[in-house]
Amino acid sequence: MKLLYQTHSPYARKVLVAAHEIGLAERLEVIHHETSPLLRNETVFALNPLGKVPVLIVDEAFVLFDSGVIVDYLDGLHEGPRLIPAQAPRRWRALRLQAIALGIADAGIEVRWESERRPAELRWPALRDGHLRKIAAACDFLERAFAAEEADAAHAPDIGEIAVATALSWIEFREVYAFRSDRPRLAAWYDRFAERPSMRATTLSGATQDG
């Protein structure tokens, strides 16, 4: 299988971390592709009409895109604990965490547009601040959730935890938001998770290319 990837994408990293956790990373040929709304990548567009990575090429006739869809597919290819638990309540906890992580990454990208990627004269600080408030609220939610559950770093991680870790790693990598401020449990949980081999093997790198 081929994974069209981007070394500075939180969504692509989520897929690759997941593949490492379930022992499938060796079955993926990882190919870096730069994509941006301002930089049309014809190879990616030919496979995904949205022009985004990650894209998983299973074979010439079977291509998947969107990180959640790809992880769901990969989760059916191994015999270990499922990244997407089948049973409640853990299933809904995992999917809810994944939704929060997706929102953090989405809002973080919007913050970057309004703070550095868009031409200065077109930036809207109020919109940037609105997205920052979303990230802050999401991180507060995670601090409370991990405080209530005392998340166990020893168990096999699920997709919610992977998504949260990769989203937090991205907002720290891009200096979008200081999530550690006044959130000791979230920071401690993230630091533990970041030491996992799957995270150490998939570190973020590179600058965004918009043209």
Image (tube, rainbow, N blue to C red):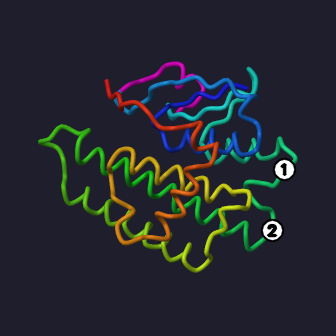
* In the foreground, 153 or 176: 153
Give me the disc on residue 80.
1
Coordinates of residue 62 in the picture (x, y in percent) = 74, 29
Task: Name the residue: 63% across, 70% down.
Answer: 151
132 left or right of 162 in image:
left
Q: Earlier in the sequence, mark 2 or mark 1?
A: 1
Q: Amino acid at mark 2?
A: Gln
Left or right of 178: which side holds 74? Answer: right
Q: Which residues are magenta?
A: 39-49
Q: Residue at x 82, y 45 (%)?
A: 76
Image quadrant occupied by the C terminus: top left
Q: In the figure, residue 178 lies in which quadrant?
A: bottom left
Residue at 79% over, 54% down: 82
Q: Can you identify the residue that label 2 sits on? A: 87
Can you name the residue that lies furthest to the right here?
79
Residue 47 image position (x, y, % from top left)? 60, 26
